[in-house]
Image: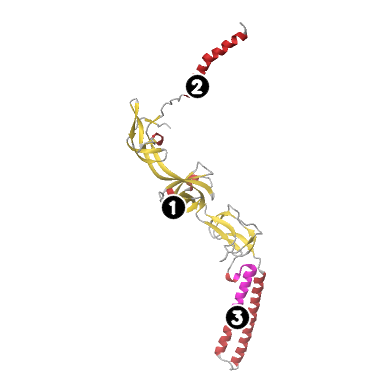
């Protein structure tokens, strides 16, 4: 029997046996596979409700040292990272006097000198007349008063000229050209360089910052919490701050301030919080200003309580229920729950330790 004779029998055999077998296999694969139930049990654990606030670490007191006279930075005596004492010299400023103010101050000095000279000549004339009996003692006192007032005006004009020309006057003890630290601490930034122009601090201008100094041993955590959680915060609450630079370093802190007014941040109202930090657990690590940090704030907690995973709660029935194994089957039972952290919930009644629960499907 040749190949051409066997081909019809092969095709007929495939149609009779292969097609039904293939259909049966596809039907079996389309049937749902019943997975074994996922079982669990209540357990004793801590249930902690906390919130996480994002923020940074900043010095409690940070002082910006301003120029008290306009001019050019002549010399800088500190660098960022230097530790300074109160009154220590930070920078020297060389005054570049304004031409108009300088000319006006010189003119005032010349005018005061002329008036003083005229008052002195008048005094000499009155003294001569008094000696001749042609002038009274009162006229002599008036002449002496005009001389004294003229001398005061001359001294004031000279002081104004020195301040305009040099930025300082020895007669009044002003040292405006020297920028000195007003507090003890560490120099954080020096945003100017020798040769930079600076503007004096006055009523209309805050002035150029020459350096920023802060006490780096007294730091605060400053962050923000959502309005949904601010109502559960109280001053004096403990928190734990984790620095982005050292995730393993957890610094304890105490909440000191909760802002009375919230700020709209991208459509969400947030409230600023401040907490004092204990830096002893940082060890030899130097905590720098403006380091990013997260604060864990415990809002409520239950220690060593019977709890159940919320994955075993029935979500399609009224109330709070679970499926508990009874013999070879399961029954639905009401349970009373307390504090929940979103994953585990405290069991107040309806369950005991050791009972087996079945997790709902889907």
Place of residue 11 in the rendered image (x, y in percent of width and height, measured from the top left): 57, 13
Q: Quadrant of the C terminus?
A: top left
Check contact, mark 2 vs mark 1: CB within 8 A: no
**Mark 3 and mark 1: span between their CA atoms?**
59 Å
Mark 2 or mark 1, earlier in chain: 2
How many C-alpha atoms fall within 10 Å of the one at disc 3: few (<14), some, or many (≥20)? many
Q: Which residues are magenta?
A: 147-170
Compared with residue 72, is residue 106 higher up or lower down, i.e. above or below? below
- Residue at 64 percent across and 68 percent down: it is 166
Place of residue 48 in the rendered image (x, y in percent of width and height, measured from the top left): 41, 41
Task: Locate residue 304: give its quadrant.
Answer: top left
The tag on residue 201 is none
Residue 148 forms part of the magenta stretch: yes
Q: Quadrant of the N terminus?
A: top right
Mark 2 or mark 3, earlier in chain: 2
Q: Is residue 222 visible?
A: no
The kind of secondary structure element at disc 1 is strand
Residue 54 forms part of the magenta stretch: no
Compared with residue 230, is residue 12 higher up or lower down, i.e. above or below? above
Residue at numbered disc 3: 150
Compared with residue 98, is residue 249 higher up or lower down, i.e. above or below? above
Q: Main secondary structure of the magenta part?
A: helix
Place of residue 76 in the rendered image (x, y in percent of width and height, measured from the top left): 63, 58
Q: Is residue 13 visible?
A: yes
Residue at numbered disc 2: 26
Task: Locate residue 2: give its quadrant.
Answer: top right
- Residue at 58 percent across and 84 percent down: it is 144
Task: Tell whether 334 sits left or right of 69.
Answer: left
Task: Locate residue 301: give its quadrant.
Answer: top left
Q: Residue furthest left?
A: 349
């Amino acid at each position: 029997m040749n190949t051409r004779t066997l081909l019809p029998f092969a095709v007929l055999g495939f149609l009779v046996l292969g097609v039904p077998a293939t259909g049966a296999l596809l039907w079996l694969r389309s049937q749902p596979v019943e997975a074994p139930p996922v079982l669990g049990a209540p357990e004793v654990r801590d249930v902690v409700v906390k919130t996480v606030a994002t923020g940074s670490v900043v010095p409690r007191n940070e002082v910006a040292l301003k120029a008290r006279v306009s001019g050019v930075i002549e010399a800088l005596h500190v660098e960022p990272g230097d530790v300074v004492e109160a009154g220590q010299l930070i920078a020297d400023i060389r005054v570049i006097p304004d031409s108009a103010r300088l000319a006006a101050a010189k003119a005032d000095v010349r005018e005061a000198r002329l008036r003083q000279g005229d008052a002195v000549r008048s005094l000499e004339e009155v003294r001569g007349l008094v000696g001749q009996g042609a002038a009274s003692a009162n006229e002599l006192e008036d002449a002496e008063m005009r001389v004294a007032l003229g001398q005061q005006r001359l001294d004031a004009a000279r002081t104004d000229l020195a301040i305009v020309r040099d930025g300082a006057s020895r007669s009044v003890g002003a040292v405006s050209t020297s920028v000195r630290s007003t507090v003890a601490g560490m120099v954080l930034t020096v945003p100017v360089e020798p040769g930079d122009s600076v503007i004096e601090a006055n009523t209309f201008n805050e002035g150029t910052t020459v350096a920023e100094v802060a006490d780096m041993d007294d730091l605060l955590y400053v962050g923000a919490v959502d309005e949904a959680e601010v109502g559960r915060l109280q001053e004096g609450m403990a928190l734990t701050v984790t620095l982005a630079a050292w995730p393993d370093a957890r610094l304890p802190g105490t909440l000191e301030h909760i802002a009375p007014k919230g700020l709209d941040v991208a459509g969400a109202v947030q409230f600023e919080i401040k907490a004092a930090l204990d830096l002893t657990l940082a060890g030899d690590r130097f905590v720098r200003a403006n380091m990013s940090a997260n604060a864990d704030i415990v809002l409520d907690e239950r220690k060593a309580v019977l709890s159940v995973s919320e994955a075993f709660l029935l979500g399609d029935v009224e109330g709070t229920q679970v499926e508990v194994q009874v013999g070879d089957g399961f029954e639905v039972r009401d349970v009373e729950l307390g504090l929940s952290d979103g994953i585990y919930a405290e069991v107040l009644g309806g369950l005991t330790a050791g009972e087996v629960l079945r997790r709902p499907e889907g």
